[in-house]
Amino acid sequence: MFTGIVEELGHVASCHPSGDGFELRVTCQKVLEGTQLGDSIAVNGVCLTVTEQSATQFTAGLAPETRQRTNLEALQPGSPVNLERSVTPSTRMGGHFVQGHVDGTGTIKSFTKDKDALWVAIEAPKDLMKYIVTKGYITLDGTSLTVVDVGEDWFNVTLVAYTQNHIVMPTKALGDAVNIEVDVLGKYVENLLQHKSVNASNVDKTFLEENGYV
């Protein structure tokens, strides 16, 4: 689990096929502190397992599902990436509960300057928009942000000056893909309500059958 508070901007050293799989190597410094093989690091919001590491780099494999659902396969050598180590019992929860399980990708629609702030509008798949609400949490490329406005197939966020200098988003271009993880609480509520509806229907049917109505 993560918090969505980016610890460091790393840079892609390589991203290429390796045997039957796909390998991503990242150059960084801070997130290597205390990290061991098998630990988790979020790369642009994607939870990856460290398989190799040195004093300045770590390597992780990308499963087919990860490559299909995220924007990681499009990374090139030199690309900046948001990095965060998984939380520990002593970690301060400065953002929100982030799983590192990307739900899909959105597309950057616009950047709008507002004094020292930056507004970013994201076009998102309609099947994800039902989980995105005004003033709710959203994770974009691993960054915990607050949703401001919501449309039918888009939403926007605003980045303060400090955030702009410490995450990948401002370096991107219009039309670039952004990894989206919606707030997991919304999915849990939806699942509970669906099961409640199914169970209620079964109870109603049983009652009718027992009393000779059907």
Image (cartoon, rainbow, N blue to C red):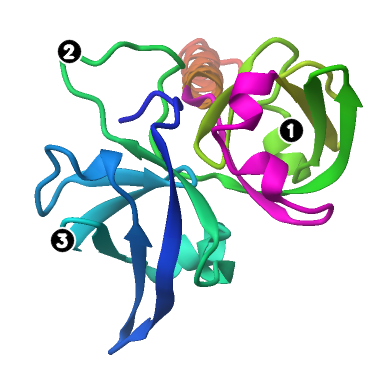
Residue 90 vertical position relative to residue 76 in the rendered view, above or below: above
Residue matched to label 1: 129
| Label 1 to label 2: alpha-carbon separation | 33 Å
Residue matched to label 2: 90
First reached walking from the N terminus: tag 2 or tag 3: 3
Question: Could you tell me residue 175's position as x and y percent?
Answer: 82, 56
Q: Is residue 18 magenta?
A: no
Residue at (82%, 26%) from the top-left corner?
119
Question: Could you tell me residue 56's position as x and y percent?
Answer: 24, 57
Magenta range is: 160-184
Q: Is residue 192 visible?
A: yes
Residue 63 vertical position relative to residue 45 in the rendered view, above or below: below
Q: Amino acid at mark 3?
A: Ser
Residue 176 vertical position relative to residue 150 in the rendered view, above or below: below
Residue at (49%, 47%) from the top-left corner?
44
Specify few, some or many for label 1: CA neighbours under 10 Å numbering under 14, 14-19, or 20 or more. some
First reached walking from the N terminus: tag 1 or tag 3: 3
Residue matched to label 3: 54
Q: Is the C-beta separation of discs 1 and 2 under 8 Å?
A: no
Answer with left or right where residue 68 lies relative to residue 118. Answer: left
Q: Secondary structure at mark 3?
A: loop
